[in-house]
Amino acid sequence: MCQGRKVQRSARSFSGGAGGSGKMDAMRDVEIDGDMIRLGQFLKLADLTDTGGEGKILIASGDVTVNGEVDTRRGRQLHRGDVVRVFQNEARVA
């Protein structure tokens, strides 16, 4: 129950990130070491979530897209050029 409230707070903070106008924040490139990174790890590295637990909930609830498609696999492998979106925030694997 407590985790659900945390996700709701995060949803408000993400959606309000562009002044509440509904516009998407500018995409930023996030450098990774190696050729790939798992989706759950990338969410935290890119500051798209505060904690790994929050990322797990967001992924499972379908609030995360990879290259424009919802992906519910926390272990999904991301490679350079992949774009991850959580609410109004986007980050590209670089």
Image (cartoon, rainbow, N blue to C red):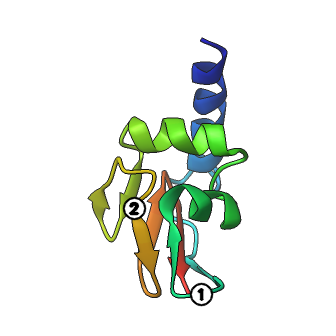
Residue tagged 2: 76
Say which residue appears at 49% left-offset and 40% top-offset. Answer: 58
* Disc 1: CA contacts within 10 A as few (<14), some (14-19) or many (>=20): few
The residue located at (44%, 56%) in the rendering is 75
From the top left corner, tell me how far across and down residue 14 is, in percent.
61, 48
| Residue found farthest to the top | 1
- Front-most of residues 64 and 89: 64
Percent x, y for residue 31?
Answer: 65, 85
Residue type highlighted by circle 2: Arg
Disc on the earlier residue, 1 or 2: 1
Q: Check disc 1 and report the residue beneath it.
A: 34
Q: CA distance from mark 1 to mark 2?
A: 15 Å
76 to the left or right of 42:
left
* Residue located at (66% from left, 27% from top): 6
The answer to whether residue 64 is visible is yes
Specify the quadrant that holds the C terminus: bottom right
The answer to whether 23 appears left or right of 72 in the picture is right
Residue 92 in picture, x, y percent from top left = 51, 79
